[in-house]
Image (cartoon, rainbow, N blue to C red):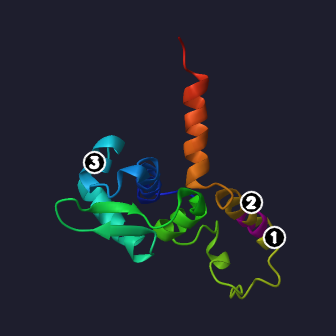
Amino acid sequence: MKISTKGRYALRFMLDLAQHESDGYIALKDVAERQNISKKYLEQIVPLLNKSGVLRTTRGYQGGYMLAKNPDEYTIGDILRITEGSLAPVTCLDDEPNRCEKADSCMTLGIWQGLYKVITDYLDSITLQEIIDKNLQKEIDQYCI
């Protein structure tokens, strides 16, 4: 499984909004500049995030985007599912219950189920706030006088 550029940029976009949540609504161009991501590319990602309800938006001169919830309420798994769809390593795990005609006799199904569980457990255990906190701690640890 590979996470696409869309998924990686969506995560960076959401982290940027989380880091600047005290600034209110953030213009897309500001995020694009800070993250070195094309504004046009972000314009393709934002509707996916907006449609899923993770963003609040406003138009006009002071318009922009902000998180709809606190950064500790968003997991990396949530964000990647919005942009990537399923995180399953094989397509037969996309549906619940598994509709694969070979599911009952598949010798490798358990491997893929285990991998899927590890992936989802890991990505669902990390919040935007935890990433920000770890990055802040890293900056503090590297500070020199």
Dot 2 alpha-carbon crowd within 10 angstroms: few under 14, some 14 to 19, many 20 or more = few
Residue 18: numbered disc: none
State which region is magenta: 112-116
**Among numbered discs 3 and 1, the one appearing first in the sequence:** 3
Camera-side residue: 11 or 119?
11
Q: Relative to residue 9, is residue 115 drawn left or right?
A: right
Q: Nearer the viewer, residue 117 or 34?
A: 34
Give the number of the disc on residue 118: 2
Q: Which residue is mark 1?
A: 110
For image coordinates 59% across by 63% down, the residue present is: 73
Name the element at disc 3.
helix
Q: Residue furthest top?
A: 145
Looking at this rendering, what residue extends furthest in the left direction?
A: 61
Tell me which amino acid carries mark 2: Val
Q: Is residue 89 above or below residue 2?
A: below
Residue 8 x, y percent position in the rendering: 46, 53
